[in-house]
Amino acid sequence: MAQGTNGRVYGGDPTLVHIPDHHRTDFGNATAEMVDSAMRMTARIQGTNDRGLLCPGCYMIALFDAAVALARKNGQPVTELGHSMADLFTKLAYDGEFKPTEEMVIRP
């Protein structure tokens, strides 16, 4: 069971590995660069196009599958992942504005 502080589900739980406060956007940007590099390296190895824009369908599926794999590996209910991430993506879909965030609402 998570032991978050100040009413948060996970935030501040000393038993969990965290990304330091105010560095989650940096970590997200680094993760994006890693996916970009890995997709291009895979294309080079396969002898296919490794220049130009990435396929959005491919990276969206890879990031989705990664989130589900991490949830399962860490004992998080995938329904909690789905509900919680859906809220962030719904807001993005409606207003089209990306605003880096440090926290999110966790919904079971």
Image: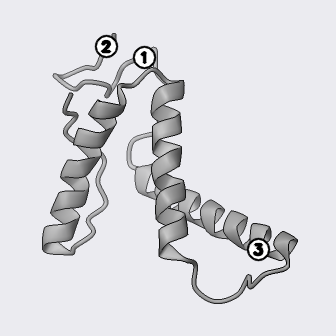
Q: CA distance from mark 1 to mark 3?
A: 40 Å
- Disc 1 marks a residue whose amino acid type is Pro
Q: Residue furthest left?
A: 94
Badge 3 local density, few (<14 within 10 Å), some, or many (20+)? some
Q: Residue at x 26, y 65 (%)?
A: 99
Residue 14 tag number = 1
Residue 37 coordinates in the image, percent (x, y): 70, 68
Residue 5 coordinates in the image, percent (x, y): 25, 20
Q: Are marks 2 and 1 in contact (CB under 8 Å)?
A: yes
Q: Which residue is mark 3?
A: 43
Q: Quadrant of residue 88?
A: bottom left
Q: Which residue is mark 2?
A: 3
Between disc 2 and disc 3, the foreground one is 3
Q: Residue at x 51, y 47 (%)?
A: 65
Q: Residue furthest top?
A: 1
Badge 1 element: loop
